[in-house]
Image: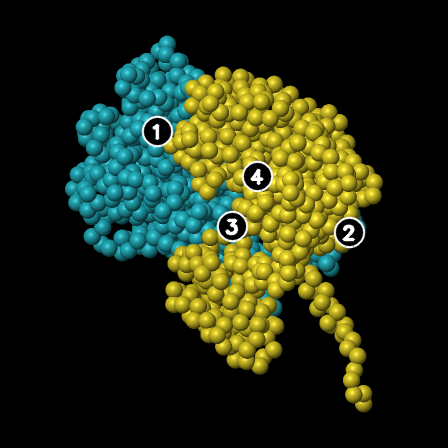
């Protein structure tokens, strides 16, 4: 008899471990719209299986809670049942011995408060508020509603130009999005149930890279209507594109010298080469009904909104979020402190700052901070340090951006809260003082709040500080024109229309606050439809591309194809594109992984796609 | 062409053929439940799943097309196992009390379960969902019988464009219910009943009103009168294995008399009256275009009236004010006929037997009580309910002696007969309008251009030098399309006939149900045949109708006629 034993996993346990991973992936693949009460009941069942069985509230109580929730879902519950659920969960929370019971009860309590309407609908009307509005998960999560299974099938069939045409039905920036979209579509891909989501964005790039010149559709007969679009970024140009296809005359007013907005003046070219951005913009302009006026600042004294109202039948405001936020630290106005927006804009205009031999600190943890960090690296800096007050996993930047920055030799200094700027006698930056932090208690959203650690301040010597802690909206001129502004953003109704301002619409970053390209494109599409409707038309945007039928096949796990990147040592010297596209072999394998939710499952019932809008 | 093998038989079919269709072409029916050709090919029940060589999982035959070289097995051990288990699973959530189900004997699920020899060893525990439904509604949904095949959702969306049905709930609690969390009586349902005739089980049916009829029949103080719509005689016999021929109408009358109705009248008489009123109303409007908006819409289909009032309320004023034939007939029975026979109209109980569900709702409208203050039609039965009454009394119709409708309200013209088919009302109205305008009868078939099953038909006729643009639509999606084009000014008509059910009453939502085939066209053909054989082809030549006007109403659109034969469509509200 040995006194101690080495733990070895039983076969059952090995399989259970695998099932845990399957379950995790399965939860990832939950489509939006499921009944929250039903989901809460399902999670509760798992919690109950975890109970060790020692204590009454957890062993018995969680089971009874399950039964009560089932009663609600099955239409057998009453308001009394809801009260009993609350009471039982409260007692379990207060009396369970360990986290297994306490947190399970907390989940139920959270739901009873958080989705009480759903509970009451079940109780009062024996039905549910949940519904799957868009049957295809990826399409439902794309803000522009792009027909993803459709274009993946076209790629698989080698019909790249048709794929681009199909994407343009809902998104006129296929090339740009194929490089910089944050791919919300991939989040709940059903493929997660088998292995992992399809690499949708990079397949799109394969299509764009191989499609050649793809002509835009014919425009509808001229309507004689004139529409002003303020802002030549992705949102404004998307609206302009569809309005032009509908036969309206569009004038785009752009403050800067060139079109593209944040795609040009925010995103560095190593992520989105300018000639590829221009490819999208040229296609949009090739529809023919778009006049572009660059260097025009609407809202300035000469070009007021009321002037536009006189001359145009409708206005779309898509000015984006282009003003920088300040740190509010002592010494922030010293020579050498630069705003992120300012620096990226200058790069976009082709004026490359020179950081040769310098030490540069970037403050912030988002994608813009990463864009600055990686750009500064390319501009010759000796040492580049991204300073952030929370942990690496709390950064809002995409993990691959952080990884790429690190590979390019940038430092990510986390748990460092900037406190003041150190300057020399001439007022030049010589360093950034930071206060080490300790990760603290969770805030209401479940993110830990950084708190001052019991440690000394640290000086990070540097010659430049770039502040990348968010952008704001230049809303003042619009506010002066009577446009409603809420917390700095333009306030609109569901369709982009503005209350009490007939014919004025707004969308994109200036409404939502700084967000993603595809959200701005989606808002532009919505605005185009509603402006058309407002002007008394009912044009439809459609495309005559037949989608290859779904193939019958069994489910086998396959790895997800990842793009290769140029070697860090090489790429950090220039602004050329970092990511290498898929090979044909990779694209065929990856497109073959799509489960065609447009045909299988709910898609075949509710129609796998919107052929027009 | 694609070459493949099904159960060892090599065949060649056209590219794009589904496995189901390919198999059927060689006499190999693949069992199915949710599938309905062209309407519901969603592979939900998985009963039609077959084995395709080279693919590990089974493949549904209804929504997948054949490929060259496919080797398909429709009865392999894997297929047998899967088919049986899936049907057992469906049954585990199905209230299988077939003894008390209207669809017993005409239920694909029952047939399939029997075919698969599922007797008493279903291993799955019964887990039947609850039912919450307003049982006073004309349309009854029994959630305990619903197998979520989605056909009702599809027919309502695709054919009728109403989206009354939709998925409700998510996950395992997914069900079919009235869309947008509405209650049926609070919805804009037209009560066309197409969902019922497309339902494979007893989950959808009409409210059964036969009990009320039996109560009236048992009450000696009541004179119980049946009136039967045209399409009923063309379809009722299908439930009894009786051919659709010369005798079927007479056998139906005989069966109804055997049940004990005091009088059996022909709603076609009411149809002839409708024509007298509607044709005159139309001509009156044509003569005074300044004060009327065109087109005038027919009003004999109550599902269409509900549709128009809810979807395009601003056009309600363009509906003919003429009542639908059974309401007009009910009002006439409780006025003219009551007077003629010296019966207190409150002692008369009028039962209309219809191919229709919406007439149940129409009969209950607050302003359909013009004769004596009580409903002009007391109960409206579907053809299926009439057939259930015949079966309840164990009447064997085919051995009865054919009988004839009672006089004086039993004479009908051929024009009244064709009310039961799309285009029929228009044709009948034009025959009479032409006579009224020109003073002479047209050829009886002069307006046959409006016949046929096309959903939207147009024609132009000349009447005394004036060109008339008319249109005939059936199916509510077609109706919606027509109205949208009208509103946009893309089309222009003087007179439009609309029937909510595809094919008109011959495809009515109250007719006998056949799961795998559709007899709408055959029903229509029979009615055209009856019209052709009828000695009277014009409503204005129906001697009973002429006498009625002479004795009672005076002339069409008279004050009395307006009171009893016309209605105010604004007198009630849609939800």
Q: In this rendering, which labeled residue sits more in front, label 4 or label 1?
A: 4
The chain ID associated with circle 3 is A
- Residue at mark 1 to residue at mark 2: CA–CA distance: 60 Å
* Residue at 39%, 42% in the rendered image: B188
- Asked which secondary structure carries label 2, the reply is loop
Q: Which chain is cyan?
A: B
Please provide percent x and percent y for residue B421.
44, 32
Q: In this rendering, which labeled residue sits more in front, label 2 or label 3?
A: 2
- Which of the two labelled residues, at mark 2 and mark 4, occupies the earlier sequence position? 4
Q: Which residue is nearer to you in this view: B165 or B323?
A: B165
> Which residue carries the number 1 mark?
B315
Q: Which chain is yellow?
A: A
Q: Which residue is nearer to you in this view: B482 or A308?
A: A308
- Residue at mark 4 to residue at mark 3: CA–CA distance: 40 Å
- Residue at mark 2 to residue at mark 3: CA–CA distance: 32 Å
Taking B460 as reference, is A141 above or below it?
below
Q: Which mark is residue A324?
A: 4
- Which of the two labelled residues, at mark 4 and mark 3, occupies the earlier sequence position? 3
The chain ID associated with circle 1 is B
* Residue at 78%, 84% in the rendered image: A4
> Which residue carries the number 2 mark?
A559
Q: Which mark is residue B473?
A: none
Q: Is residue B488 left or right of residue B58?
A: left
- Residue at mark 2 to residue at mark 4: CA–CA distance: 41 Å
């Amino acid at each position: 008899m040995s006194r101690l034993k080495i733990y070895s996993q039983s076969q059952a346990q090995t399989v259970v471990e695998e099932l845990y991973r399957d379950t995790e992936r399965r939860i990832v693949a939950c489509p939006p719209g499921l009944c929250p009460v039903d989901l809460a009941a399902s999670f509760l069942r798992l919690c109950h299986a975890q109970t060790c069985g020692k204590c009454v509230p957890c062993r018995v109580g969680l089971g009874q809670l399950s039964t009560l929730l089932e009663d609600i879902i099955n239409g057998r519950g009453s308001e009394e049942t809801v009260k009993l659920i609350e009471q039982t969960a409260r007692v379990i929370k207060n009396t369970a011995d360990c986290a297994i019971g306490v947190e399970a009860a907390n989940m139920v309590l959270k739901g009873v408060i958080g989705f009480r309407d759903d509970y009451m609908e079940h109780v009062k009307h024996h039905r549910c508020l949940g519904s799957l509005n868009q049957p295809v998960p990826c399409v439902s999560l794309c803000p522009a509603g792009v027909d993803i299974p459709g274009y993946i099938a076209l790629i698989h069939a080698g019909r790249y130009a048709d794929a681009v045409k199909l994407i343009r039905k809902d998104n006129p920036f296929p090339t740009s999005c194929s490089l910089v979209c944050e791919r919300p579509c991939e989040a709940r891909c059903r493929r997660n149930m088998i292995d992992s989501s399809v690499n949708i964005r990079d397949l799109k790039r394969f299509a764009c890279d191989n499609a050649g010149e793809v002509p835009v559709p014919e425009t509808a007969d001229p309507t004689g209507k004139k529409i002003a679009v303020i802002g030549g970024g992705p949102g404004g140009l998307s609206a302009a594109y569809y309005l032009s296809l509908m036969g309206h005359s569009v004038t785009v007013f752009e403050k800067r010298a060139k079109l593209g907005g944040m795609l040009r003046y925010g995103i560095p070219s190593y992520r989105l080469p300018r000639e590829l951005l221009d490819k999208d913009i040229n296609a949009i302009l090739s529809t023919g009904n778009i006049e572009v006026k660059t260097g025009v600042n609407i809202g300035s004294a000469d070009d007021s909104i009321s002037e536009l109202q006189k001359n145009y039948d409708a206005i779309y405001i898509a000015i984006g979020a282009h003003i920088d936020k300040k740190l509010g630290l002592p010494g922030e106005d010293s020579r050498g402190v630069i705003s992120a927006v300012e620096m990226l804009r200058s790069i976009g205009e082709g004026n490359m700052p020179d950081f040769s031999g310098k030490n540069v600190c970037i403050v912030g943890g988002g994608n813009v901070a990463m864009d600055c960090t990686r750009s500064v690296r390319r501009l010759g800096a000796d040492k580049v340090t991204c300073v952030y007050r929370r942990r690496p996993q709390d950064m809002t930047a995409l993990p691959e951006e952080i990884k790429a920055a690190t590979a390019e030799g940038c430092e990510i200094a986390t748990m460092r809260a900037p406190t003041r700027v150190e300057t020399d006698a001439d007022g030049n930056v010589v360093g950034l003082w930071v206060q080490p932090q300790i990760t603290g208690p969770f805030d209401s959203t479940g993110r830990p709040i950084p708190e001052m650690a019991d440690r000394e301040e640290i000086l990070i010597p540097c010659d430049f500080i770039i502040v990348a802690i968010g952008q704001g909206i230049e809303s003042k001129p619009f506010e002066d024109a009577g446009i409603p502004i809420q917390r700095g953003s333009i306030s609109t109704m569901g369709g982009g229309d503005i209350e009490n301002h007939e014919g004025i619409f707004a969308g994109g970053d200036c409404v939502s606050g700084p967000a993603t390209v595809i959200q701005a494109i989606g808002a532009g599409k919505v605005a185009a439809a509603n402006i058309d409707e407002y002007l008394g038309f009912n044009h439809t945007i459609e495309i005559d591309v037949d989608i290859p039928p779904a193939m019958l096949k069994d489910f086998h796990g396959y790895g997800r194809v990842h793009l290769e990147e140029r070697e860090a040592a090489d790429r950090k010297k220039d602004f050329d594109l970092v990511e290498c596209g898929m090979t044909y072999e990779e694209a065929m394998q990856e497109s073959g992984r799509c489960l065609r939710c447009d045909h299988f499952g709910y898609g075949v019932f509710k129609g796998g796609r919107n052929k027009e809008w | 062409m694609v070459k493949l093998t099904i159960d060892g038989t090599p065949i060649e079919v056209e590219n794009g053929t589904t496995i189901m269709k390919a198999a059927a072409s060689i006499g190999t029916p693949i069992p199915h439940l949710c599938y309905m050709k062209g309407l519901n090919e969603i592979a939900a029940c998985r009963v039609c799943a077959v084995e395709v060589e080279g693919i590990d999982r089974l493949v549904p035959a209804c929504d997948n097309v054949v490929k060259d070289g496919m080797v398909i097995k429709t009865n392999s051990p894997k297929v047998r196992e899967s088919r049986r288990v899936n049907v057992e699973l469906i049954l585990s959530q199905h209230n299988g009390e077939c003894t008390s189900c209207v669809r017993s004997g005409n239920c694909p699920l029952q047939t399939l379960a029997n075919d698969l020899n599922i007797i008493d060893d279903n291993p799955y525990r019964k887990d039947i969902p609850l039912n919450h439904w307003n049982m006073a509604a004309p349309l009854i949904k029994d959630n305990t019988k619903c197998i979520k095949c989605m056909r009702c959702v599809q027919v309502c969306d695709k054919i009728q464009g109403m989206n009354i049905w939709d998925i409700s709930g998510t996950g395992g609690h997914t069900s079919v219910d009235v869309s947008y969390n509405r209650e049926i009586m609070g919805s804009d349902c037209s009560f066309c009943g197409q969902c019922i005739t497309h339902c494979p089980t007893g989950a959808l049916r009409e409210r059964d009103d036969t009990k009320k009829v039996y109560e009236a029949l048992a009450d000696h103080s009541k004179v119980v009168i049946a009136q039967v719509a045209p399409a009923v005689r063309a379809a009722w016999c299908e439930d009894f294995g009786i051919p659709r021929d010369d005798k079927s109408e007479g056998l139906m009358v005989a069966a109804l008399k055997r049940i004990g109705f005091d009088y059996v009248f022909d709603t076609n008489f009411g149809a002839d009256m409708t024509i007298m009123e509607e044709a005159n109303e139309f001509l009156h409007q044509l003569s005074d275009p300044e004060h009327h908006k065109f087109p005038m819409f027919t009003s004999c289909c109550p599902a269409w009236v509900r549709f128009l009032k809810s979807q395009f309320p601003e056009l309600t004023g363009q509906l003919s004010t003429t009542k639908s034939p059974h309401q007009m007939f009910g009002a006439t029975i409780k006025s003219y006929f009551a007077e003629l026979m010296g019966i207190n109209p409150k002692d008369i109980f009028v039962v209309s037997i219809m191919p229709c569900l919406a007439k149940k709702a129409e009969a209950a409208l607050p302003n359909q009580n013009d004769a004596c203050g009580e409903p002009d039609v007391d109960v409206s039965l579907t053809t299926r309910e009439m057939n259930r009454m015949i079966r309840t009394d164990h009447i064997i119709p085919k051995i009865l002696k054919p009988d004839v409708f009672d006089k004086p309200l039993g004479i009908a013209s051929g024009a009244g007969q064709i009310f039961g088919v799309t285009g029929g009302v228009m044709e009948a109205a034009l025959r009479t309008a032409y006579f009224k305008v020109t003073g002479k009868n047209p050829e009886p078939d002069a307006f046959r251009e409006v016949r046929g099953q096309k959903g939207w038909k147009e024609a132009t006729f000349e009447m005394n030098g004036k060109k008339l643009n008319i249109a005939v639509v059936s199916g509510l999606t077609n109706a919606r399309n027509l109205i949208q084009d009208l509103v946009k000014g893309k089309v222009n008509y003087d007179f439009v006939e609309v029937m909510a059910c595809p094919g008109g009453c011959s495809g009515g939502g109250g007719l006998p149900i056949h799961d795998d085939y559709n007899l709408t066209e055959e029903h229509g053909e029979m009615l055209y045949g009856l019209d052709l054989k009828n000695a009277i082809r014009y409503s204005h030549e129906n001697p009973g109708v002429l006498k009625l006007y002479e004795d009672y109403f005076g002339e069409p659109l008279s004050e009395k006629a307006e009171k009893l034969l016309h209605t105010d469509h604004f007198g009630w509200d849609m939800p």
